[in-house]
Each structure stands twice: as structure tokens, then as C-alpha cells.
Amino acid sequence: MARPRRPDPAQEAREAGLALLREKAVLLPLLGEIHFIPDKPHQFVADQGWLAVTPKGSVYLHPTRRASADEWARVIGIGVVCLGFGMVRGRAPQDLWETACLLSAERFCDELKLGQLPEVLWHGPVVVPAGGEDALFRRWCADAVDPALARWHRWWCGGRPLFVGLDGKGVDHWRKPPDWPALLAEGIAQGVGRALRVVAGRETAAGHVTPADSPAQRARRRLMDSYPLLGALAAGFDLEEGLAQCRQYDIQVAAIDVGARTIWMNPTARLTDAQALFVFAHELLHAGLNHGSRRRGRDPLLWNVACDFLINAWLIDMGVGTAPALGLLHDPTLAAHSAEEVYDLLARNLRRARKLITLRGPGQPDMLGEARDGPFVDAEEYCRRALAQGLERWLFGGGRGTIPAGLIEAIRSLSQPPIPWDVRLAEWFDERFPPPELRRSYARPSRRQSATPGIPRPSPLKPPEEQRKSRVFGVVLDTSGSMPPQLLGKALGAIASYSLAHDVYAVRLVCCDAAAYDDGWVEPERLLERFTLKGRGGTVLQPGVDCLSRLAQRGEFPRHGPLLLITDGECEDALEIAFDHAFLLPEGRRLPFVPGGKVFAVK
């Protein structure tokens, strides 16, 4: 029975070093044309040397020299680079020429971060001039070379030449040498291409292909290249296709987290390129239209479904890809509505609406998380700005293609900053209490101007008492235990300030929890002082409205209002209000019914 062959550590280290070389795309074309030969008879490589190189592409290696894989990778790489730069040729004095070539090739390997030199081949710092090995060789021919570098060359070659077979009569005399510089140029081009693929996420640094050529990644690149409306948004989001994460979040097709700037797409969904384009654009529009922050206390699933109906209709009108079967929520009759209006329509049949399926799956919204502030820029602000810039690029490019008018209107409305609640409340007061007409009269003496003391001037008259007393309105104030004190303070302060600014005579204040407490007519100035409120029990607003209705029937309150209701939204499901009215709510809260008047959200 034959004995098992003993492993050769030197051979294994050389092969491991060659494997490291093949990971460098720059050297691959050269390595494909080079023959690596262990010089067992030491025909070209000295006992104390490392390798020898022929101009036709044979690299002879020391057969038994011990070194690590990194060290062999650097040593062999220097010989390969010498071939690639066309250095393997004769030039007297040969030892100076070879030393200059070794130093120039070593600098190139340093830039490639290729292995490390064996300790025996370390040397002091040497500056290679801009002209490379030629300039270094000419300088040494004019001036003496450093003796330390001469010894360094001997450690490389063991007293023999590094470049052998220069006369063309070696063992590879039959071979026609390839164009080594052209092969190196090809390798550099491949290296640049790999670097770009690594940056784009299509390949790892080790050369392994990533899922970047999946339909999702191709859809992302296509949006960036061919769709100016969504290109900037697509560039700002990372794409995750990890199956484990999709299972963790129970994502059947796709989902988005605007705060994390990440879009997840399940690789097992088996989307075509057209379907992946549609799905990716769908998730980007969720981000660009700020659907996360616009929810404002609405049911997450129902709000997601309402937004999906509009997004899918717009994408189908634009002809962006093909809609997948799962998560296709499309109703052409809803395209003319806003997301808030679609939500109110869906809320009429909650049981049916909750059975609708989003791209994440049945009963789950595909908008994950909440918009979070980054260290420098708000995520939703970035998305809003990117979508607006995409619209401008589309318009600047001539408006090729089709963008639905509803989508353009939605983008432009988001580009305008929202009006603060206190400004909107002031406008509401302006509509109900216009400035009283200014009247002047000569019946009373007036101040005369010093420039024209002989000309009498009319003096302003105060409005009639009846007109002043008609400038009143009612306030139903929710004083239940759920009302935050900050909201009560802000609301009463704003009401008092605007009442004084608009010459409001008095406010009819009704506190309301489970019952109504009529505080009578209150002067606006008193609301700015310490004011005692009644209640802090349950929440029912209808008794407060009924209290003002009875006062209106007795002529103690205007029949048409106006009336301002201040509540946190935790009230009954329906209110019957015959007055001109408006609601004041904390930001993020919603009324459990469709309001008949304006709603102001207090921050």
C-alpha cells in the first residue's frame, strides 16, 4: 500500500499567495498569460533568491523557500508588475536596472495593498521620482547607488540576474510574448469597473456578486437613470433584500422605513423587472409625499390603504412598470380625491377596509416606523425636497411623459410650508369679526394739527353700544380629565389675544365634561389672568352645545354663533351643532366624526 503523500508547506504557501493575487482584478489579465514554474533544479533561481522572470511570461519560483501567503503574494506580484510595465529587458548595468524596476513595482503593489514583503527584503525609505524606474536608473548611472540597495538586490536574486532569458533562447523560446502593457491596462480598466460595482453595491470587495443585479436593484438604477421625478429619491434610499429581515418584519413583497431611509423587498416574491419598478416607485412615493407624518392619529392600516389607492392610480396612469397581483389597490373612481378624503370614505366600512391587502401583506401597513430626525437633516424634509426637485427637473426637461395632475398638485402643495394653527385661527377671527367701520364727526372738538391750526379736524367716534355688544362668540371648553393643561392654556391665551385684537366684547364660556357649566359672559381680559375651570370628569360635548342653543332661543346668544369647541377629540361619536363653528384639537388627534367646521391643530 502506497504511503500518503506528505504535504509541501512551501508549495501550499505559494499557491495561497497566487490565490491572493487572483483577487486583484488589476492583475487578472496578466496572470492568465503567465506560467508559474517551481525551479527545482535551480536553473534560474539561486539558493538564496526568490524568483526569476523571462520576457515571454515564465516566472520561476524558489521551490523550497518558506514564507507566508501574504509574503509570496507580494514577491510574486512584484515580478508580475515588472512584466506588466514592460520592464523585463536588458539594460546595462543590469543590476542597477533591476533594482530600479523592483522599487517601482513595489510602489505599485503598495498602492494595490497587495500582501507584505518578507522581513529579509525590508529596506529603508526610497523616493521613486515621477519618471519611475527610468529616472531612478539614470540618476544611479550618474551618481553611485546606495550600497544598502545593492545588498537588497542581492537578497532578492541571490547573486543571479532577476530578468532571465533576455536573448530569447530560454525554455520558452517557442512562445510569442503577449503585449504585457496592454494586458495591464485591461486589468486596470477591470479594476476600476469592479470598484464602481462595489460602490454601487453590485459586488463585494472580495469579488463576490451581490443581489445587486436582482430585479429590485435594476429597478432602482432605472428610476435613477430614466425617471427624473423619482431619481433623487431613489438615490437617497438603501435597498435591503435580506430574507431573514423580511421574515422578521413579515414583509411579503415590500415595505419602507422613511426614518431609516431603507426599502425592503422580499427576494422570494419573484417580481419581474416591470413589477419591481412599480413596487419601488410605489414605496418612494410614500416617502416623497410624507404619508408617515400626514397620518396624524389616523388608523395606520386604513391610512396606508387610502394612500395606496392614490399611488397605484398615479403609477398606472404614468405607465411605470406593471402592478403586482399582491397589494394592488386600485379604484379609478378614487383618483380625484385626496388621501384624507379616501380615508374618510374607507372609514364608513371598516370591516371591508381592514381586509384589503398592502404590499407588506394582509392587515399590515407597508410604511414601517416613524419619521426620525437625523443628525443634520429631517428624513421627510429630505424626501419632500427630493420629490419637488424631481418635478422641477421633469418640467425643465420639457415635461416628457405623463404625470397625473393630482400627483403634481400633491407635490406642489407639500412644497409650500403649512400655515401655523395660530395664523389660521386669526384668519377665522378676521372672517367673523371684521374691523368696525371707522366713523368721524365734527360734533365734538378735535385736536388740530400744529401746521394748520385754523382748520378743524373731525374726531373719531366710538362704535355704537349695540354694535360693540354684538361682537361676541361662544366657547365650549372640554374640561374632562383627559384634556392636557398645556392645551387649555394655549387655547385660552390665543382666544383672549385674538378677541382683544378684534374688539370682541365678551366670550360666552361653557365648560363641559359629563355635564355643562355655564360661566356666563367673560371679558377677554379675564382669560389672560388666573381663571378657574369647572369639570375634569368624563367627556360629552353635546350638553355644552345644547346649553348655547337654549341661550340662543331666549335671545341671550347669537342664533348663528360663531362657536369654538376646544377638545382633545376623546368625545362622543356624533355632535349636532346648528351654529357656525370650528374645533381646536391637539396636533395628532382626530375627531371621531366628520366635522362640519374647520379644525385647527394646536402644537
Image (cartoon, helix red, strand yellow):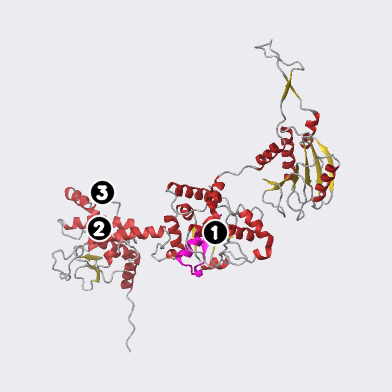
Residue 466 x/y as whole percent: 80, 31
Q: Quadrant of the N terminus?
A: bottom left
Q: Mark 1 or mark 3: which is in front?
A: 1
Q: Is residue 306 left or right of residue 126?
A: right
Do tag 2 and tag 1 residues touch (Cβ < 8 Å)? no
Q: In which quadrant of the rendered view does residue 29 lie?
A: bottom left
Which residue position holds label 1? 313
Q: Secondary structure at mark 3?
A: loop
- Residue at 72% of width from left, 46% of height from top? 583
Task: Pick the residue in front: 21 or 455.
Answer: 455
Magenta region includes residue 78: no
The residue sitting at the bottom extreme is: 1
Do tag 2 and tag 3 residues touch (Cβ < 8 Å)? no
Which residue position holds label 3? 130
Q: Which mark is residue 261?
A: none
Residue 307 x/y as whole percent: 59, 57
Do tag 1 and tag 3 residues touch (Cβ < 8 Å)? no
- Residue at 38% of width from left, 57% of height from top? 196
How far is the residue under mark 2 from the one under mark 1?
Answer: 66 Å
Task: Specify the segment rendered in magenta.
Answer: 255-282
Q: Is residue 570 above or below residue 48?
A: above
Q: Amino acid at mark 2?
A: Leu
Residue 441 x/y as whole percent: 74, 20
Which residue position holds label 2? 102
